[in-house]
Image (cartoon, grey):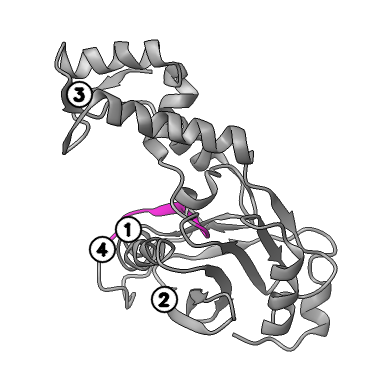
Amino acid sequence: MSYNPNAGKTKINFNEAWYKINRTLRHIRNNGVTEVYEVTSYSLNNLDNLKRLIKELPVRSVGWQHTDVWHTATIYIPKGKGAWYSRNILDLIDAGFGNKDKFKELWYLRNGDSYYGYFPKISTSTTSNVRAQQSSYIVCDRAQPPNLQSKIPGTSDFVDRTHLISSRITGIENHKGLLIDFDGWLNKNPLKKFETWTLQQTFKQDIIWYVKIWKLNDGLHWKYIMYDKHFQKIKEFECVDDRWSYLWFYDPGQDRFSRTSLYKN
């Protein structure tokens, strides 16, 4: 672990900085970690069963399903309960800076004796390393070159290990059912833009976050649908990664729903 001097773009005071750390610690103590459930008793390939799952899931828990044809994940987010986590803060806590005296030491390295300064950040990100090493059902086939005729408007030389549900909501960086490979430009641009919009909406209303992935001849499809608490659609977004080739793995028995369910987007 090393200290990153190029951290924080806006000055804050020490108490505000420590409040952010302590707020996350309190949230973890009071609520525990986000629970994640694989749905194996019925298909999540239709709206009726999604409604059923949301009724059955504990609030702010994640439900997911993977088959040989589709991958889905969902969470119910009550108003004001969305963006609890920051990757930087989780890294600091993991590195031992969830202790106020230790955090003061890091603050001093960045800002000296000044009460006002920049929020510290460490250079070695545990969350990024864990995410990159986490296995996934949907991974880029590194043996295949990128498609030079891709319709993606931006350029990218890499794929990202991408969250299906923002880690700012779940705090999760290491779950096989919630991370897949996806084009780096798409992840950092249209997906991030839609995710940011949704996170802002969680301060205004309850949100049911639903994402579905499927693979066709034209590429790997990613579709977001955001519902209100009555399952009225608020906003949706779909993009296709046709730049990279993907390997789609599944466990024994995970194909049983695709054999009996009509495939719907």
Q: In which quadrant is the N terminus drawn?
A: top left
Give the x, y percent position of residue 222.
49, 72
Front of the two marks 1 and 4: 1
Which residue is labeled 1 in the image? 188
Which amino acid, mark 2?
A: Cys
Residue 166 belongs to the span the image colors magenta: no
Contact between marks 1 and 4 (CB within 8 A): the answer is: no
Residue count near mark 3 (Cα–Cα under 10 Å), binned few <14, some 14–19, many ≥20: some
Q: Which of 114 and 161 is in front in this view?
A: 114
Which amino acid, mark 4?
A: Thr
Residue at horizontal 33 percent and vertical 68 percent from the top = 190
Residue at mark 4 to residue at mark 3: CA–CA distance? 29 Å
Which residue is labeled 3 in the image? 5
Residue at mark 3 to residue at mark 1: CA–CA distance? 24 Å
Give the x, y percent position of residue 147.
37, 70
Write down the region rendered in magenta: 155-165
**In the displayed structure, would residue 65 be above or below residue 239?**
above
Q: Element type at marker 1?
A: helix
Which dot marks residue 31? none
Which of marks 4 and 1 precedes in the sequence? 4
Residue count near mark 2 (Cα–Cα under 10 Å), binned few <14, some 14–19, many ≥20: some
Which dot marks residue 155? 4
Front of the two marks 4 and 3: 3
Residue at mark 2 to residue at mark 4: CA–CA distance? 15 Å
Which of marks 2 and 3 precedes in the sequence? 3
Which amino acid, mark 3?
A: Pro
Which residue is labeled 2 in the image? 239
Which amino acid, mark 1?
A: Lys
